[in-house]
Image (cartoon, coloured by chain):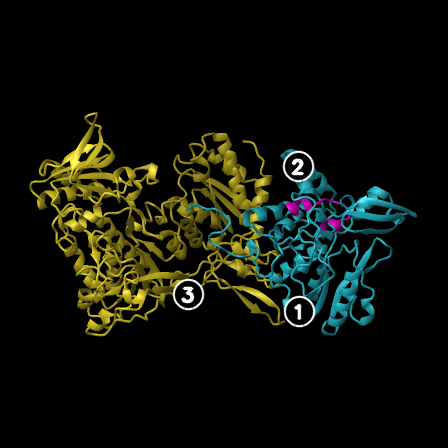
Chain colours: A yellow, B cyan
Amino acid sequence: MRIGVFVCHCGSNIAATVDCPAVAEQAKNLQDVVFTTDTMYTCSEPGQNEIIEAIKEHNLDGVVVASCSPRMHEATFRRALERAGLNRYMLEMANIREHVSWIGKDKERNTVKAFELVSIAAAKLRNNNPLFANKFDVTKRVLVIGGGVAGIQAALDCADAGYQVVMVEREQSIGGKMAKIDKTFPTVDCSSCILGPKMVDVAQHENITLYAMSEVEKIEGYVGNFDVQVRKKATYVNWDDCTGCGACMEKCPSKKNLDAFNEGISKCTAINIPFPQAIPKKAAINPEGCMMLKKGKCGVCAKVCPTKCIDFEQKDEILTEKVGAVIAATGYDMFDHSVYKQYGAGQYPDVITSLQYERLMNASGPTGGHIKRPSDGKEPKKVVFVQCVGSRDPAVGRPYCSGFCCMYTAKQAILTKDHIPDSDSYVFYMDIRSPGKGYDEFTRRAQEQYGVQYLRGRVSMIYPKGDHYVVRGADTLAGTQVEVEADLVVLAVGAESAKNAPALAEKMRISYDSYGFFMEAHPKLKPVETNTAGVYLAGSCVGPRDIPTSVGQGSAAAAKVMTLFSKDKLESDPQVSSVNASRCVGCLKCAKTCPFGAIKEVTDRGGNVKAEVIETVCQGCGICTVTCPQGAIQLQHFTDNQILAEVNALCQAQLDF
Amino acid sequence: MQALAELKDQIRKALPELDVVIGWQQGYDALHTRPLFIRSEEDIDKLVVNEFCVVNPSSYLREMRGGKKVGLVLKGCDSRSVIQLIQEELLNKDDLTIFGFGCNGVLNHAKLQARFGDIGYIESAESDGNTVNLVVAGNKETAPFAELCAEKCLTCSYPNTLQCSHFAGEESDKKAEAAQDKALEEFEQLSMEERFAFWQDQMRRCIRCYACRNACPMCVCKDHCLANSRQPKWLSEDVDVQNNFMFQMIHVMHLTGRCVECGECERACPMDIPIMLLRRKMAGIVRDVFAYNAGTNAEDTSPLMRFEVEEPTIEERH
């Protein structure tokens, strides 16, 4: 074999703490290495051309590039090899930037380690074989999980591009959090007026199939060919016939059920349509409240229903869908404020969350848009807003900033003044975070034009006094403790990951952080992609996002799906497991440990049981290869021999610089 | 011995349905037994069950895949290896008839030799699980069982054959002498360097005869053992410390969650290398991490033979 080694300076990124020319010089002594050099930027066009020329001039059949992480530039150099006529898998990268120069300052030891990594890469390369990709078909349908504004935007963009979209929504209606909000910052335009038309578009678009009251049960398969199981939860109403007339709601005698859409500040009937603009506008029975389902007596709704669509026998249904890509737009949930016992959250009726306050202000909310205290229905004259409840507080395990609370609190304070002109509003804040177009002007307007009193400090406790409350906190700008009397206290609760987000992430085989938010493939350069091919992210499932960002990400994820679907065939990754049938003893331990069901049992001509890998299903995780006691199943490009060669090279490399 | 008579009776009744029954017969002297393959009525009377029935008859099973109806006379420890092989679907439960009995432990030739000199002088030895009565060169001798038995019997929790089709005689009520593995505990008191030096010495003595592998009932790869493989090439043919150590570690790793601690490997070792220390350590780790005892229930799945996103016995982040 004839190997060329290219050591990259990466400007001064590597060269500052690694002696690149010395590494290149020493690499000449490695077995089969016939050419070495060091370049300023190997990834640049002249750098790549140097590789191509060296391959031709020195008749190289393998290349080691010692530079950055293969996650950065492996694809770049593989293309360069292909341009020079080599197989792309005859490249090995030694990561001497992230693994060496960026983490150590000792130039001498860095240089030794860089050389060791180069010798490992060269040893592996000597065991490399050319690999070739297979092509497979793409199912040009996309699954959108979550029908909030991000999911709606993604679904509409994909549908408009001509692709079939399957949207799965956990709740009874799409719309997500934005449907609950009264007005949006900083323009103070009606939330449902701008979201409503988009929701209707989803319902009416011929390319969109909507499953509300449904959850993703299972996702199998791989990019281009996912098999999705959707659990359609029992609604006890036949939605094909329901017209959403609401006659059942009027007559239902069980009227004291938790109204989840109104955040629990009002009660609703057991059979219910959550809000007038709901999409789909269909009734569903809450089995916990329904007398017929609980005790077998009642059935009033079935009697009054003009289309006879009530079905008390309905069961959950499992549907299967074939899709080629998945967009997760599962959004967020509000932080459970009741852990703040000192605020009386969940105990005092007039200490409410910001989202509950939105429902109080909303014209289609339970109070018809009149702000009334939950306890006695009186109009509050003094409203205190407490920011950072469940944000920026390591004590409750939420050290991150939720990002949008500063803005919605300013909006709510402005709207309070609009609703009740003789009211006073106070805001306890830590910092005002308003980096967005027109955002800072908006918070200034709240203070200057609407006279909202901003107090910089945290609230230590809230206690009742007569029929109002006292909010005690610090005013760190004045250096004093303050007590503010309030008729109503609104806690600006932060965002946390959606309920069961980790379980869904595991179904999609994507990573999630310790808070349950999904991980992007790269926080800057791949913000809507994941490390699982064909799975994309949009909106607040990645972390708290405001509406414009969520919509933008919805469109971005849709664009990624369209890019994927622009190809008729995809190339499968040849870095998958393969079975050496002559070594396989047919114990099928590999099949038992495979997380993806990628190994099937076959019988050879002699009637012996053997394992066989389904190439398109295999993800190349390598669990089977460590399970196989015979070493009969090998992960291509990461075979036992290649890894052993790397270990041997590492143990043998002893050089002084 | 009542159990033996019952066993013979049970085997006699079952034999017409079976191709072969594997048990033990008297060897060339009082202290040795050898495997017995019962194929006809006449063979049944050769069967013995005593303190020297050391060999695990299930080691012969891997040669017998392919639908043969096999009967097995098994001690408690032996039955665990059969159960483990059934779990791994390497044996078909329906093809097996297991004859069980209560075992009082087996004796260790090396210990006998250490105490009485050449074991050729020992004319007989009988044990009730507590004391051993011997006749050595015509003289009667008595010794505590714990001093002469196999190491595994000291910590044995399964003296009775598990999940057997027939059980002869009374159940053994023998308890483990020590809950903890004394030898292993003492070894772990040593420093890392001392332990490494110990294994280097031991591995230097290993001649890589593969007797340990061939005696192991769980080594089912037959001619495909990784140790002999050139592709992939894990080991060189050199018999040096590194390669020997590598081989022994591969053997232990391949037995993780499968080893039933029958001790056949160490007994078969001609160099008396205490390789059971490694296996007992690994079995202990499996017990700690997965709360799993290999080969005790045919319905179980060994923890490393399945894929779970979250192991129920391991506390992960939540």
Label 1: few (<14), some (14–19) or many (≥20) C-alpha neighbours in 10 Å: some
Vertical arrangement, residue B236 with respect to residue A381, above or below: below
Judging by the rendered image, the residue that carries numbered circle 3 is A136
Along the viewing direction, whichever of A639 and A458 lies nearer the viewer:
A458
Give me the chain letter of mark 2: B
Is residue A435 toward the left or the right of residue B114 in the image? left
The secondary structure type at the circle numbered 2 is helix
Disc on the earlier residue, 1 or 2: 1
Is residue B198 toward the left or the right of residue A65 in the image? right
Residue type, numbered disc 1 = Asp
Residue bounds of the magenta highlight:
B265-280
- Image x and y of residue A236, in percent: 29, 68
The secondary structure type at the circle numbered 1 is helix
Depth-wise, is mark 2 or mark 3 nearer the camera? 2
Q: Residue furthest right?
A: B138
Judging by the rendered image, the residue that carries numbered circle 1 is B95
* Residue B157 colored in magenta in the image: no
Label 2: few (<14), some (14–19) or many (≥20) C-alpha neighbours in 10 Å: some
Along the viewing direction, whichever of B306 and A333 lies nearer the viewer:
A333
Vertical arrangement, residue A168 with respect to residue A547, above or below: below
Give me the chain letter of mark 3: A
* Label 2 to label 3: alpha-carbon separation: 54 Å
Q: Are marks 1 and 3 on the same chain?
A: no
Is residue A424 toward the left or the right of residue B56 in the image? left
Q: Are marks 2 and 3 on the same chain?
A: no
Judging by the rendered image, the residue that carries numbered circle 2 is B195
* Label 1 to label 2: alpha-carbon separation: 45 Å
User: Which residue is painted at 18% across and 49% down in the image?
Assistant: A358
- Image x and y of residue A28, in percent: 54, 40
Q: Are marks 1 and 2 on the same chain?
A: yes
